[in-house]
Image (spheres, rainbow, N blue to C red):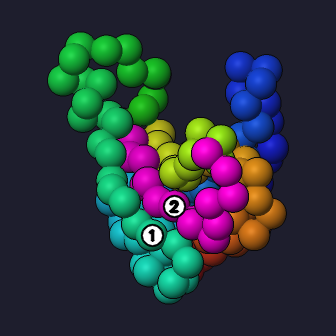
Amino acid sequence: MKQTLFQEKYPVLVSEIGKNETACKSVEDIAAYFKAKIAENPKVKFIALFDHFAHTKSINGEIGTGICGALDVIFCFGFALPNPQVLAVRPRSIGVADMGDKFVVSFMEAPMKPANDAMEMWVKGLRNQA
């Protein structure tokens, strides 16, 4: 995984996974994999799938070159609710883009180490998980 600053302010972790490196053949397969990982942890709650590609296409929005599918898996690590400000960084999402020959999987760094560790482990688990 590569850590970057998206737009010079958002800490994002990104992994490019060749389609030959994973048993997953589509963004839907990867979303199902993440839903299963979320279901394994009683402190994590699945919320929704958002088909970002279909939405953007339906409003005649701009879609980057090479992107042929894009989903967001939305969920929450709800370990605590210590103050109202924490709501600004919840829920979490993992984005999955189909780039033809590879998938690009990304998520914004969470302010909680256990959440980051879990998401990073899930993403790394996509490689050769057949």
Type of the residue with mark 1: Lys
Give percent across and percent down for residue 23.
Answer: 46, 73
Type of the residue with mark 2: Cys
Residue corresponding to mark 2: 76
Drawn side of residue 88 relative to residue 112, left or right: left
- The region drawn magenta spans 69-84
Residue count near mark 2 (Cα–Cα under 10 Å), binned few <14, some 14–19, many ≥20: some
Tell me what residue is drawn at x 79 percent, y 47 percent: 2
Tell me what residue is drawn at x 63 percent, y 70 percent: 79
How many discs mark residues in the rendered view?
2
Image: 113 above or below 38: above
Quarter of the image for residue 56 reads top left
Query: Is 44 in the magenta?
Result: no
Residue corresponding to mark 1: 45
Residue 23 visible in the picture:
no
- Dot 2 or dot 1: first in sequence order is 1
Give percent across and percent down for residue 118.
Answer: 68, 71
